[in-house]
Image (cartoon, rainbow, N blue to C red):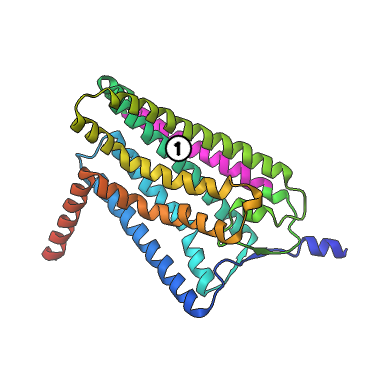
Amino acid sequence: MEMENQTTSVTSFVFLGFSYDPPVQFFLFLMFFLIYVVTLMGNITVLMAIRSNSNLNSPMYFFLSHLSFIDICFSSATVPKLLDNIYGSQAISFNSCLTQMFFILLTTSTECFILAAMAYDRYAAICKPLHYVQIMNRAFCRWLMGGAWAISFFHAMANTLPILKLVFCGPSIINHFSCEFPSLIVLSCTEPLLNIIMFLITGGILAFFSFLVILLSYVNIVSSVLKIHSAEARRKTFSTCSSHLIVVILLYGTASLRYVKPRSASSIIMDEYFSIQYSISTPMLNPIIYSLKNREVKEAIKKLMGYKRLLCCAM
């Protein structure tokens, strides 16, 4: 009877991440709050600029607008609760923890698919220019996005629902700032081997497939660009891909260091650092990178800002 009480006692968890002295807490709260504000403003601006400009109706901007939307969701899945952890309650209910984990898995995997779709779009534009319009038609782009959301939803559900079968009888302290799968699964009092296998299989297939599409796309792009005799033409072609490559490196590089590194190299501080990089910093940097590297996006944002100023003056 005592064991039953213990197994049902954990109805909430406590985050241990970022429990520092008050001055440090204030600095961290201010830093993450500013990052979140910049993330929202940057991605909303890019989203509005693309949707309001009829010239930006190509597949590349279609995917970029969805990337901005998913970055808003990605950041919102973790940062608001992180801010509450620093100056509010560090506790989170079991159901809220599972919900957060679900949305982290959903948004992360969807972003991987969007980056793969963007890489394939660049491949079609550079390597198959005569057939680009037929390949990347509107219906195909919508099918890619619908498939990305559907597969990501299945991936998130397949790794979240089985957690309900595990018993959490204590400890209830999560050595992290969010309910990511690795941080939560170690608290289970029952053997989570099947959960870990499911996570590795579904996550591995998803990451491998999306990265393979990106890799093969850029292998073909580089091969085609090297055949161009004009150095200026090569530079312009590579510049259209540079922003996407930077975003891919930021996401895959830091996420792989978080999930794929050897177990012996695990440390709470390093896990938090890598998680901050791909789940908080990357959604903030994506719109900045695309705005700085893409002339059409910059012009659309300037036009949008000018339109807003005219409205303010008229009012």
Q: Nearer the viewer, residue 307 or 230?
A: 230
Residue 107 in sight from this viewpoint? no
Q: Which residue occupies 44% across, 43% down?
A: 111
The answer to if 298 sits in the magenta stretch is no
Q: Which residue occupies 41% across, 71% down?
A: 30
Q: Nearer the viewer, residue 166 or 197?
A: 197
The x, y position of residue 221, in whole percent, is 34, 28
Magenta extent: 138-162
**Amino acid bearing label 1:** Phe
Quick one: SS at disc 1? helix
Q: Is residue 120 left or right of residue 198?
A: left
The x, y position of residue 280, in whole percent, is 45, 57
Residue 13 in sight from this viewpoint? yes
Q: Is residue 47 left or right of residue 209?
A: left
Q: Is residue 18 above or below residue 75?
A: below
Return the residue at label 1. 113
Residue, far right: 1
Q: Is residue 140 left or right of residue 84?
A: left
Q: Is residue 109 left or right of residue 45?
A: right
Residue, far bottom: 22
